[in-house]
Image: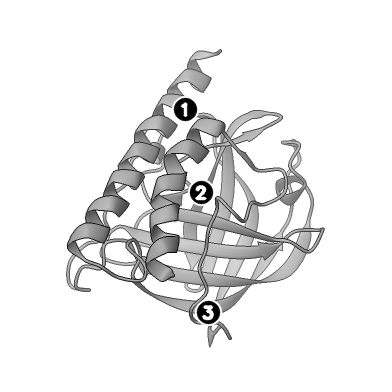
Amino acid sequence: MTLTSSLTRGAADAGGALLAAGARTLGAVRPAPKPLHPVGRVVTGQLHRQGLGSRTGVAFLDEPGDQDVVVRESRAIGLPEALPDIHGLAIRVVNQDGSRGDLLLATTGWGRLTRFVLTASRTTYGRPMTTLLPYRTEGGPLLLGARSASPGVVALACAVGDGRWRQFAELVVSGEDAPDQEISFDPVLNQVTGLEQYPVVLRLREPAYSSARRSRA
């Protein structure tokens, strides 16, 4: 195992444990249908993928294409709007086989180590966002990231380990409400084809999402 892989997987362990503990704590002190990201707006959007010149082995990242998506912008803890909060961006895409895939990102840093660290912001796109936990791909542990490109436009990028970011798509977020305002995003159940989750990430993530599913039920 390379040093980069070791660092990335170590960050995955720490990040996953933090997410699970946070969900359990918030669920206990603030019962709600969504222990994490209790309030947000759900809107329609369009994803324009230009693809990557240097392939990752993941068709969703490597190949160009356009599709309609559903987007949720939210505050993770649910603090008053005047206070900084950890902001979340959820994107639902449709895989080539017709199944759904969910991508969840939260405000972090953008550097080699800070991309694995949650940070607070006053606005949704006031800070960069990443998936925090890496996916397993042919090219190695891969992280997805997002940064505001202009009002209503979000640049999506990917990075292998602690390597450089490479933009693969633009997300255009509309102001139109999505038909299903009660949609629940679940990256454990709904995976994007080619973005496989490490077993350790699944073990760490599942308790938090199981708790969220029980709360909604």
Whether residue 142 is visible, yes or no, is yes
**What residue is drawn where x is 77% and y is 47%?**
59
- Frontmost of labels 2 and 1 is 1
Spatial separation of the CA atoms under disc 3 and disc 1: 32 Å
Colour setup of the view? one colour
Residue 4 % position (x, y): 50, 20
Could you say which disc has been placed on residue 43 in the image?
A: 3
Asked if marks 2 and 3 touch (Cβ < 8 Å), the reply is no
Disc 2 target residue:
145
Distance in Å between CA atoms under marks 2 and 3: 20 Å
Can you give x and y, in whole percent of width and height, for residue 168 in the image? Answer: 66, 50
Q: Secondary structure at mark 1?
A: helix
The disc, 2 or 3, on the residue closer to the chain's N-terminal end is: 3
Q: Secondary structure at mark 2?
A: strand
Q: Position of residue 152 (x, y in %)?
A: 51, 73
| Amino acid carrying mark 3 in the image | Val
Tell me the quarter of the picture where residue 39 sits.
bottom left
Residue placed at 72% from the left, 49% from the top?
193
Q: Residue furthest right?
A: 97
* 2 or 1: tag closer to the N-terminus: 1
Marks counted in the figure total 3
Which amino acid type is marked by label 1?
Thr
Mark 2 vs mark 3, foreground winner is: 3
Disc sitting over residue 8 in the figure = 1
> For residue 29, which quarter of the picture?
bottom left
In-image side of 67 versus 209 (left or right): right
Q: Quadrant of the C terminus?
A: bottom left
Of 143 and 78, nearer the camera is 78
